[in-house]
Image: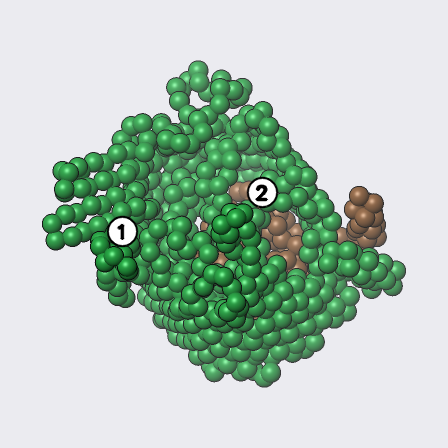
Amino acid sequence: MIRRRTPALIAILLFATLSGQLYFSGSSNLRYGESKTGQLYSESILNGNALLGNFNSWFQLEFSNPPELGRTVNGLQKFRLEYNTANSVFKFGDIYEIWGRGLVLNQYEDQLVDFDNSLTGISIRNQWNESLDWSIISGYRERHRLFGADANYTLKSLSVGISYLQSREQHLFEKFVPSTGYVLDSLMVTHRVKDLRTEYFADWYDIYVEYADKRTYDFNTDSIRSFYNGGGQGFYSNLNIYIGAWALSMDYKKYSFNISEPDPFSVADNYSGIFSFQRPPTVIREHTSRLLNRITHQVNFDDEVGYQIELSGPVLSDIMVLANYSKTSRNDVWNKIEVPNDTTNIYFHWEWQSVESTGLLPLTETYSVPFEELYLEVEGFSFNDRLHYRIGAARTIEVIDIFDHRITDTTRNIMYEEAGAITFPTALDWNINKRWNFEVKYEYQEFKKYKRIINTQTGIDTKESLFATPVQYNAFLSLGVSHSPGWSCALLIDASSRLEFGTTPQLDNINTLEKIVSNFIDLENRWIALELRWNITNSHTLTLTYGSQQGGILCSNGVCREIEAFEDGFKFTLTSLF
Amino acid sequence: MRKAALFFILFLCTINAQDQGAKMVPDLRLELLNGKKITLQSLLEKGPVLIDFWATWCEPCKKEMVYLDKFHRTYVDSGFTVLSINQDTPRSMSKVKAYIRSKRFSFLVAKDPNKQVAQKLNVQVLPTTFLVLPDRKIIWQHVGYLPGDEKDIEEQILKALK
């Protein structure tokens, strides 16, 4: 596809440039990093937009060898041509669309976690009249061939939307052949999602409700393996109430696209759940704190029920308060039950069985895999707006995995992994004069992660920490100074008392900054870095980082990636807008 | 590799062939937080527009917005408008209106949940600010925000209003 696109793009650009009618703009992001542990990346991404009358083309070139995340790409990565009329937009190329809040379709690119679910094809959007607009998309991505239509009707403050999305997928799976072992096979699967939504705006409140129904059909009846042709539903709603400058925001979700047992391996070949074009709201708070982001709940879009309530407003003219509470759990309560063998009728093995549905609200009990978080924040300005402060506190509790849950009339046998944390993120900005600013960020966290085993038959009741000590103490300190509009400099200190069993310990190499800091503070596991940012012009920024950065889970938009630690090295980033 | 080199040459030639003042913004179609649909052109008919890309998780953006609101209130009678384009995805979109209301911001806020508007203006980092004249030409742009940058922003607004 790239080979076919390249000459077309060159021809369009040349023609437009020569004709003198082309308005061109672009941006580039050049990144390079190298560490003593052998990590190396080199990435150049160029985005360009050409405007010619009613035509607008966008393209993205990438030259990476290797990239920081994902696969190596050299050449034209994305291309789209748009034609705009007074009431319509026609798009051809790489399409990104969002319908409703993403229960049916939500396409975006997130380079932070190397996620992209765009579609190569066409899209047409039309504003039929003041009230009605509609759109259609058609195209393909990897093994999916998609077609979908969406319509919205707006009458004053009320709007109603309806969508339909279909994908024919060549689904890959591994099948076991006795003579050769596991081999790769495929079958044709059709996904169909229907969606209905409504939104109403009033002066003191607004409400949004969306419902999606997904069905999956397997047409390959000759397959050796038999698959479950399933389906499920997703429901999301949001209510905001405004009283003066105060706002109460409530979100609710019930995603039951594919209700499954707690064992995560059992869904590996199950295609009847959510597919990559659906990205519904997570209904948990999105944090800016570095330590809180590391323990973000990994949302199960297939099987989760939950809500989030947030109250925010001013208590005095310069002080804002915010309180957020979110809670989720799986849809069903699971128990392992002894199942008799079909032929012998002798009790033979244990199997997960849903014994109860949680209903509309999430549960707190361990066997529903709950997550709960309370976050409080005070933010404000003081000293004639020269001091800005933000003080937060969060309490997080989560059951991460359930390995065993067997309850009979006489015995209880439970094994699960749980995590809990208390986090205090704080930030302070002091505006020294019109151009100079000093910033301190300090975050502190007490984190517990343990495996709990209860067996009433043997009398075992243990709580085994996954760290060498019962509690892991984490801290992050950032000391920064900036001079507008030229430059900023920040020293970043990330420390942890004990690492989790099984994770790679920090290597012996200590960078120069860590040597200097160790004269003042004794830290066992620390990642220290110095970041310099120079605004060369209003549109060109150079960032240089020297030192080490801790790895771990990085989550964005419900997509999580394991990021490797960066030990004793340099990072260089040049961002330009032209 | 040849293809890559050709692209870069073409790219640089095209950029060098025009001055900064020739950069144009397409007529953006936007949906505001209250569901109303507007076009950039309809705002430009009144005077210059400062377009600001931001998100609720972006701390520098929030600091900058305090000043943008002041500028909007001060110069709105002269035809100037601040148009902030929110980049929150559906996961945090429900908090945007609550945030704006609790801060009592008076400028216009549009939604761009899958960054399609940002892509048209080549936005890579937040905040990014553009000052656009009624003929849709960008006269000033700024990437990032450091405390103190608001002085430069106001200077540019005053230049645009002259």
The image position of residue A191, as x and y in percent, is 50, 69
Residue positioned 33% across, 40% down in the render: A423
Task: Kindly indicate whether the residue at mark 2 contacts the one at mark 1 (C-beta within 8 angstroms).
Answer: no
Chain letter corresponding to the colour green: A
Q: Residue A273 — which label?
A: none
Indicate the quadrant where residue A249 lies: bottom left
**Residue under the point 53% across and 27% down:** A567
Residue A69, disc = 2
Q: Relative to A265, is A421 above or below?
A: above
Tag of residue A349 = 1
The residue located at (41%, 59%) in the rendering is A301
Q: Mark 1: which secondary structure? A: strand
The percent position of residue A193, horizontal first and vertical second, equals 48, 71
Q: Is residue A173 above or below residue A199?
A: above
Which chain is brown in the rendering?
B
Which color mode does the image show? by chain
Q: Residues within 10 Å of mark 1 (few under 14, many from 20)?
A: few
In the image, residue A38 above or below residue A484: above
Residue type at the position of mark 2: Leu
On screen, A105 above or below B58?
below
Residue A529 is situated, as x and y percent measured from the top left of the image, at 52, 29
Q: What percent of the width, then of the height, locates residue A86?
A: 68, 77
